Every structure is written in structure tokens, then in C-alpha cells.
Image (cartoon, rainbow, N blue to C red):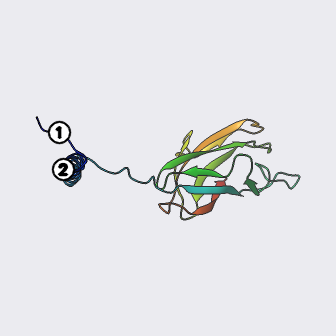
Amino acid sequence: MRRWDRRRLIGLGVVIGAVVVALLVVLIALGVLVLPAQPAAQVTVSSVHWTLVQGSTGHGFGWFGPSEFNYTYPAYPVEVPPGHTFVVVWTFSNHDLSSHSIVSISAASPFRFVSSQPSIVPPLNVPAGEDSGLLDLTIQAPNDGGATFSLALTVTIT
């Protein structure tokens, strides 16, 4: 019976290592083994800037409050996968003595307004004195992963 000396053990180890490496190369070439993909860099939405195109009450105030305002900390910043949608919630009140309609919503590029819940098509009627209106706006994020943007939304009220 032959004895396993150090030289034979090292040789056997080299052969086994070469077989394992060759097997891994074949499995990678066949697509069986793949390296995990790096997750796409997120789009950061730093804040939401609102512009309301609206008339004024008899006291000179906007029907739905200030015509410009921002959503910032603590709700923002948020991170969104590039090209995916996310929801911005708008809580509003109609301070006028007449009903008004939300007729359009737009998002400035590179964002895109997708839809609202409830829908503004046909225009969404908001009764006089409504103090707990709520709209969920679905917005599509830009495809520029790793970038930071402020979302600008314009709401037109008649």
C-alpha cells in the first residue's frame, strides 16, 4: 500500500481545485450561476411643491387655501425605484361659499401624473365648505436613478 506524502496531497488538491474551477466556469458560461445584479440606484424625491390655479373667496383668500405651498420634512425625502409609481396624498378644503371643481393635475418633467383617486375625470366637484377632501395622486418617477428631484404639481380648480 502506498503512502500519501505531502507532494501527492498537494498534487491531489491542485487537481481537485482545477476541476472545481472548470466546473464553475462551465456553469457560469451556461447561465446556471449568475452574480447578483446591483440594485438600481433610487430616485430621491426631496419635496413636493404645489401650485393651485384657483380663484379667491370674497375675503381675498384662495378657494382651497394658499396658491403655493410645499410638502417637506418629515414626509420627504422619499426614495422610489426609477420609472416606478408612488402616491402623493393631498388633503384639501374648499373655503368658499360655492362648490368648485378640480379639473386638471399635472406634474412637471421629469415626473408624470398618472391618475388620482378619486378620479378627476370628469372634473371632481368639491362642495362648498368641504373641509376633509382627500386625493391620492399616482406619480411616475423619472428613469434617472441616483438623482434627486423636487416634484412640482399644478392643480387647476374652477
Find residue 3 and name its label: 1
Residue 154 seen in render: no
Counting from the top left corner in percent of width and height, residue 86 is at: 54, 47
Specify the label residue 99 is tagged with: none
User: Looking at the image, how many numbered discs can be counted on the residues?
Assistant: 2
Q: Quadrant of residue 95?
A: top right
Which residue is at a point 20% across and 51% down the rendered structure image? 11
Residue extending farthest to the right is: 59
Residue placed most toward the observer, 26 or 91? 26
Q: Nearer the viewer, residue 117 or 53?
A: 117
Q: Residues under labels 1 and 2: Cα distance? A: 18 Å
Marks 1, 2: nearer the viewer: 1
Q: Is residue 32 left or right of residue 107?
A: left
**Amino acid tagged 1:** Arg
Residue at image point 60% right, 62% down: 148
- Mark number displayed over residue 15: 2
Label 1 neighbour load within 10 Å: few <14, some 14-19, many 20+: few
Disc 2 secondary structure class: helix
Q: Secondary structure at mark 1?
A: loop
In the rendered image, residue 35, in percent from the top left (x then y), is placed at 34, 51
Q: Position of residue 78 (x, y in %)?
A: 62, 50
Residue found at x 58% / y 54%: 104
Residue at 25% in and 47% down: 6
